[in-house]
Amino acid sequence: MLLKAVFLSAALALPAAAQDVADMAPRAGWSVTPTAKSFDDLVAATRGAAGAGKLAVVTMAGPTGAAASRGIEIPGNRVIGLYNNDFAVRVLRLSTPAMIEAPIRVYVTENADGTATLSYKLPSEVLAPYIADAPALAEVAAELDLAFAAVALAATR
């Protein structure tokens, strides 16, 4: 039994080979836009397009670099949080619990063919669970839908 545990621990500590990850596919409540851009180009374009929706990049995270430093190769993968203080103040005035959703994120993924896709859950879907208690939040969510659509359009052209 001890030998099995030692073997399993050693096997799990070894770097993994390149992993296949499925391309993003359309899904209900999401915007999914495949592009001809490379992963790095789409990340840069998305960051640069935040202003098109009067938003700012407030967070960025992704496992690709950290995985590579561990000897694990995965396709490009970056989550970019977008928001602005006007939306934050308005949402907070309407629903303290809804602020847990800020910033709202877009997701840049590298496709198997080397191109990249920009995806995000529609802000109206993200905020939907809070609207029953704060109906005016629906107006803010609709504005955020438009803002994120503007970012996506600018980034994916």
Image (cartoon, rainbow, N blue to C red):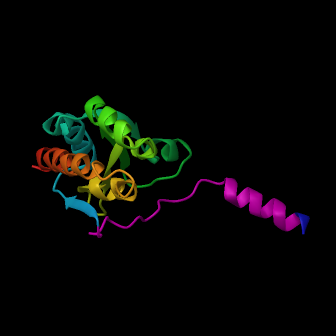
Q: Nearer the viewer, residue 49 or 140?
A: 140
Percent coordinates x, y for residue 30 in the rendering: 28, 62
Residue 16 percent coordinates (x, y): 56, 58
* Front-lying residue, 60 or 16: 60
Q: Quadrant of residue 59?
A: top left
Left or right relative to 152: residue 126 = right
The residue located at (34%, 58%) in the rendering is 128
- Residue at x 70%, y 60% (from the top left corner): 11
Residue under the image location 76 percent in, 63 percent down: 8
- The magenta stretch spans which residues? 3-28
The reply to whether residue 122 is in sight is no
User: Exactly how many numbered labels are in the figure?
Assistant: 0
- Whether residue 20 is in magenta: the answer is yes
Percent position of residue 40, x then y: 27, 43
> Horizontal placement of 68 versus 79: left or right?
right
**Whether residue 7 can be seen here:** yes
Foreground residue, 150 or 107?
Answer: 150
| Residue sticking out furthest to the top | 85
**Image position, residue 24 (x, y; %):** 31, 64
